[in-house]
Amino acid sequence: MILLTYLIGFSIVLFAIGLAGIAAERHLIVILLAIELIFVASTIALVSFFAYSASPDPDAVLMLFSIFTVAAVEVITVITFYVYMKKYGVEFDVTKLSKMKW
Amino acid sequence: MLDIYAFFLIAAITIISSIFVFIEKKLIHAVAALSLAFMGSALLFFLLGQTFIALLQLIVFVGGLSTYLIVAVAAEEKSAMIIRLPVFFILAIALSAGLGLVLLGYVSATATNTAPGFLDSATMALQGSYVLFYIMAVLLFGVSISGVLIIRKFAKLVV
């Protein structure tokens, strides 16, 4: 029997890896991929609480579908950024992207 | 007892591949590692008995988004498809073997038998509130399309 503690610990580890990636990485696309990892970690936490609950709340489905759709939209944004930054020769280093600052 | 070993194997593969997202130099390797992490999480959902959500994860994330990312990155980068053979292939073969074991019913978690499946809850939650989902889907579709258009319009101005 898999304990709920293991699952939540696994989810926290995955979340921490994603957060550390956002903090340490300079490549814009990899930062956005790290956000995808955080979405996966939150999905794992949600589904494990759902699976181990004696009377699970059906509204968890709404939250899960929201996570999925936001993750899908984020991937579209990643690809658009990647293609256009490659096309116009923009550096992917976020510390050099000074033209997008206000 | 077998399910604990399976869980730790899946968790180790997912964590290793999610670390590879950051330590790989080439973007295509990072994207391949991310798709392995997606596949590991889908396998974990199979192990937890949530078949519907695992299939959704496989179809949406592994089948759709990862393929889209890999194709987009491979189209732009030269010599992009040279993926480092040993690491990724060992991880992918291990994950596929695990997926086969779980799907064939050799490994299953026993803790989730009391809870209803995700599909039942989905049908319960969706009764009478389809409109909300349609609105949400149309809004997100519009947001993604308009995001593409905005980036396309402002890319020339920013550069």
Image (spheres, helix red, strand yellow):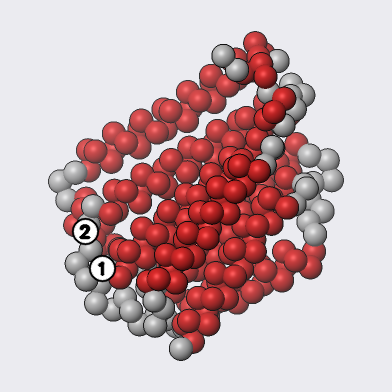
Q: Which residue bears the numbered disc 1?
A: A53
For the point 61% across and 54% down, the residue is B34
Q: Is residue B4 above or below residue A70?
A: below
Q: What chain letter is assigned to the residue under label 1?
A: A
For the point 77% across and 47% down, the residue is B26
Q: Which residue bears the numbered disc 2?
A: A57
Q: Are marks 2 and 1 in contact (CB under 8 Å)?
A: yes
Position in image of residue B113 (x %, y %): 28, 78
Badge 2 element? loop
Q: What chain letter is assigned to the residue under label 2?
A: A
Q: What is the distance, in whole Å, between disc 2 and disc 1 at their CAs?
A: 9 Å
For the point 77% across and 24% down, the residue is A89
Residue B107 shows which numbered tag? none
Please give left or right for residue A97 compared with residue B8 in the image. right
Position in image of residue B5 (x %, y %): 53, 82
Q: Which class describes the residues within 10 Å of circle 2: few (<14), some (14-19), or many (20+)? A: few
Residue found farthest to the top? B157
Q: Is residue A91 above or below residue B45?
A: above
Look at the image and tell me whether residue B49 can be seen: yes
Badge 1 element? loop
The one of A94 and B67 positioned closer to us in this rendering:
A94
The disc labelled 2 sits on which kind of residue?
Answer: Asp
